[in-house]
Amino acid sequence: MLILHCPYCDVMAEETDLAPGGEAHLRREATASDDAAFRDYLFQRRNPRGVHFERWRHAFGCGKWFHAARCTQTLEVFGTYSAQVSTPPDDILAKIRSRRPDWKGFE
Amino acid sequence: MSTRLANGGVRIDRSRPLDFTFNGRRLKGFEGDTLASALLANGQTLVGRSFKYHRPRGIVASGAEEPNALVRLGKGDRAEPNQRATTTELFAGLEAGSQNHWPSLEFDIGAINAKLSRFLPAGFYYKTFIHPRAAWKHLFEPVIRQSAGLGPAPTERDADRYEHFYAFVDVLVIGGGAAGLKSAEVAGRAGAKTLLIEQTAAFGGRTLVDPCEIDGKAGPEWVEDQLARLDGLDTVTCRTRMMGAGVYDHGYCLAYERISDHTPGDGRPRHRLWRIRAKRIITATGAIERPLPFSGNDVPGVMLASAVRDYVGLYGVSPGDRTVVVTNNDDAYRTAIALKEAGLDVPAILDARPMATNALADKARGLGIRVEVGRGVASVQGTKQVTGVSICAQAGEGAVLETIACDCVAMSGGWSPVVHLWSHCGGKLIWDPDHAHFAPDPDRPPLGADGSGFVIAAGSASGALHAGDAVESAVRAGRQAAEETGHEPGDEAAPEITVEDEQFMEAVWCMPQGADIKLRSKAFLDYQNDVKVSDVQLAAQEGFESVEHAKRYTTLGMATDQGKLSNINGLAVLAHARDASIPQVGTTTFRPPYTPISMGAIAGEARGALFKPVRKTPMDDWHADHGAHWEPVADWRRPYTYRQGGENIEQAVTREILNTRTNVGLLDASTLGKILVKGPDAGKFLDLIYTNMMSSLKMGRCRYGLMCTENGFLFDDGVVVRLGEDSFLCHTTSGGSDRVHAWMEEWLQTEWWDLKVYTANLTEQFAQVAVVGPKARAVLEALGGIDVSGDVLPFMAFAEGTLAGIKARVFRISFSGELSYEIAVPAAQGLAFWQACLDAGSAHDIQPYGTEALHVMRAEKGFIMIGDETDGTVIPQDLGLDWAISKKKDDFIGKRAQMRSFMRREDRKQLVGLATEDPRTVLPDGAHAVEPGTNAYGHARTIGHVTSTYFSPTLDRSIAMALIKGGADRMGETLSFQVDKDRTIRAKVVDPVFLDKDGERQNV
């Protein structure tokens, strides 16, 4: 039962109010992509033990999608941010580095 | 024999006697009693039979850890099996009965199992009942089920109601003993919003009965003062009869409140499940005393030393006239002293330690109690009641030195902190060799959202068994919780505790140390599941060395008490058998709930009509009044058909179809999804969402569209209407409206956020009525207000205006192949418009029709239904819907996937029509088409299955659709459908459009 901050409503939202949306920052492979790239886009997902970026929707709140950076091992949440970015914002990355000095960084 | 004492009992009110029954016998207790204390007060020491061997069992404990005293409570719609007598509050008229015996508690045939116990060792199910295989089902299992088990489940519907409750607090304190009371005060005084919960009916915990002074006051007096102090704090809420059931991620906690278990039928909910979000949780859950593993430690009358003290101190009940105390620590001396002070006989204290030089021992000796050191119990005499104990040297093999007559044995193997709630969410434990227990490791707590620990253990639950250390840890915990939730605690000191110093206990995992197999085979670890020292040793010997394996093989700790008494002793025996240390062996996983909670509490109000609320259209009442036979469609209920007179369902459906095809039918289509997509980029967006080109749709026109997933699979369909330049109305399937709306929002928000588009789900804002059939136009003309002539409103056109005086949108679309109009009106006027259509249509023999007629008519036309012809693996091309897939567009969701090689294979399953050789035979839904021969696994070779199948009244023959491998090339072939072992139906592959392929009926 996670609790995540909705950046749109500015409330701490209960997991029951949220819907998970899997890995964040996937790049959509459209018509021109080759088979391998399209396969990876459809089916290949990261499942790290540690820092992870995820999509969540405040389904029973404002209905907005947002992103969360959290640790899959300890469930520590480094922050949530707009879904309308292609890479995590700098302040989130800085927070992760301060909490996880060994982290390899966002790929 | 156990009995009520003349004096004492801080929990009971002797001025309020209560009558209750046990196994039909009328007995008396007092208000404040538990069922267990009242049974003991009446001399009822035998309360049940054990699970496997049917051994006579009595009350062992005084709280939630009780493994034996499970009873059946109430009857009829309030019957509840497997309730712990020790946590059941007595009330007038309580009816209880014992379980797991036949024919009676005193004489039980199943007790023969005990004589056979040599043949029922750990894992005997796995070993013994393997061959012959059929015998398991017909012989072994029924016999074992009959003789093993707890109480039978109630058969009647639960008469009580249950509810959920939500709470958000800074600090949740679980456990209302001295530590919890003190922590809550410190946190609350600092300004933290604090909730304190206690699982029993009274605060105080062991403070009520253990002899110690707090701030110069006796325990019960201090508790009262402390409650008054908490009452004065606005920040603190205290609740009794409420158990912390489980601790979950990020400070979420479930608590279980037993509101009216002790006042059944008073109108209040029975249980309440609290869903609490706390910033910090203090677990002040106390500690549980461990039994000692000696032969016969399960004979009724053998009890935990602390429980014996509780019954005397809390309830004024003597568990026996002569009690032998057997211990490996100082605390049990308090029991001996309490018994002596209550005027009862304590023939001896058997202390397994080589010496007892502590203050409590001196006090006991001073009271004239015989203290024997280095001694243990060799065996217990008696079967249904203790009659004596044989004592031996703890260091020996059990040679009997002396037998002492007694009717009660008070045992203490040391104390284990209740670490369950600490452990539920990942809190780690450390082994404390001095006290021989696992305690929370404060450096490795469960972590919250911010990465810091959110659970703090306090009092004896933290491992601080000495009362002074316990309250000090409680003050620290309260202070820490307050600080970490942004409050400033004061600097008050911990209360002064006056209590005897104690010498260290000495771990005893087997009594006597060198007990032979005969003794070990009667030394019980897990009372409820009948697991003995010898079973755990056997498991280790047979290779079940992992604690999790040994647990499952022996069933140690798997009963309803979840091993609260047995776990540590069992681990120690396993460790010893493996020659490993206890921390090396580790613990099994602690899982919620702490003690069993009712299914009713979990369900809460979600039962009956509230289990899954039904969505109803504005015309629902009318349908109900006119013979509707309902069908659930997603969350909606829709009329399947409307029965008239003595019609059966099939006759009603046939009538509705024929009337619609001949005259005119009326369908409530309000459940269809209606999503408004609006904005300068709406067309561009819909081009990406649909396989068709939607941006080219002309104003005032409709187009049937398909939606695919990124995998290319078809997932929803419906008619799109262009309402204006930048405004589209997208119809979806009845079950798909929420899903499709969420789908659109997902793409708009997370992929194409540059598009200027808004969406709104208007499904419930409009009622929708389909007027269908050759006379449909005449009905609409009679309603008046909009020109619905074929020239002005041709097929797939849309008009807006007023029909029968009601604002309406008219879509000329058809799902039946008939001349058909679907009319949307504001939901509030849905019923009025429905009635207006019936009135205007009466001259044209209008009749409402239900979903089954709808289905048959669409199948006659070969129209697909999402969920029938699609199953998440079907692409539009499989269904012959290539015409609805734009070739001009660069991109739409699913386009890339449909280019993958597997999607382009010629032998994909494709949609075909089926005409059975016998036109009266209707294929079963889902029937598989088989080809001769078998596949690699020896199974029939299947090439596809039936997706829709009906008897068509219009064509007076059966019709079906199927997805068949390479179906497009099989036109004219006859396929075999194996519907039963020896029944095959043959059907010819035909065009799926059975009726009016040229659309002459709808284009009029």
Image: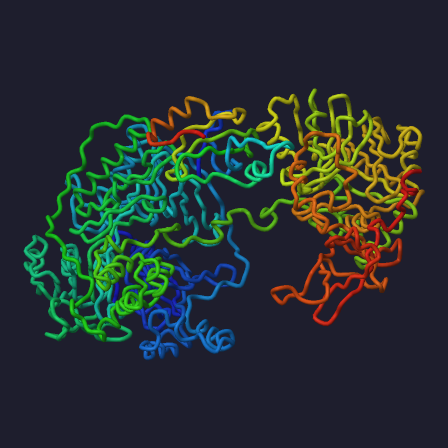
Left or right side of A107 for B111: left
For residue B688, above or below residue B931 = above
Left or right side of B253 for A20: right
> Can residue B16 be seen in this snapshot?
no
Display coloring: rainbow
Q: Which one is in front, B202 or B440?
A: B440
> Can residue B953 be seen in this snapshot?
yes
The quarter of the image holding the C terminus of chain B is top right
User: Residue B107 falls in which quadrant of the image?
Assistant: bottom left
The residue depicted at 31 percent of the width and 64 percent of the height is B526
Image x and y of residue B991, in percent: 84, 51
The residue depicted at 33 percent of the width and 29 percent of the height is A101
The quarter of the image holding the N terminus of chain B is bottom left
- Give the total of numbered labels: 0
Left or right side of B196 for B573: left
Q: Which one is in front, B930 or B413?
A: B930
User: Residue B238 falls in which quadrant of the image?
Assistant: top left
For residue B52, above or below residue B640 = below
The residue depicted at 73 percent of the width and 61 percent of the height is B929
For residue B19, above or below residue B105 = above
The residue depicted at 54 percent of the width and 61 percent of the height is B156
Image x and y of residue B738, in percent: 64, 37
Image x and y of residue B52, in percent: 37, 71
Image x and y of residue B723, in percent: 78, 26
Q: Which one is in front, B932 or B228?
A: B932
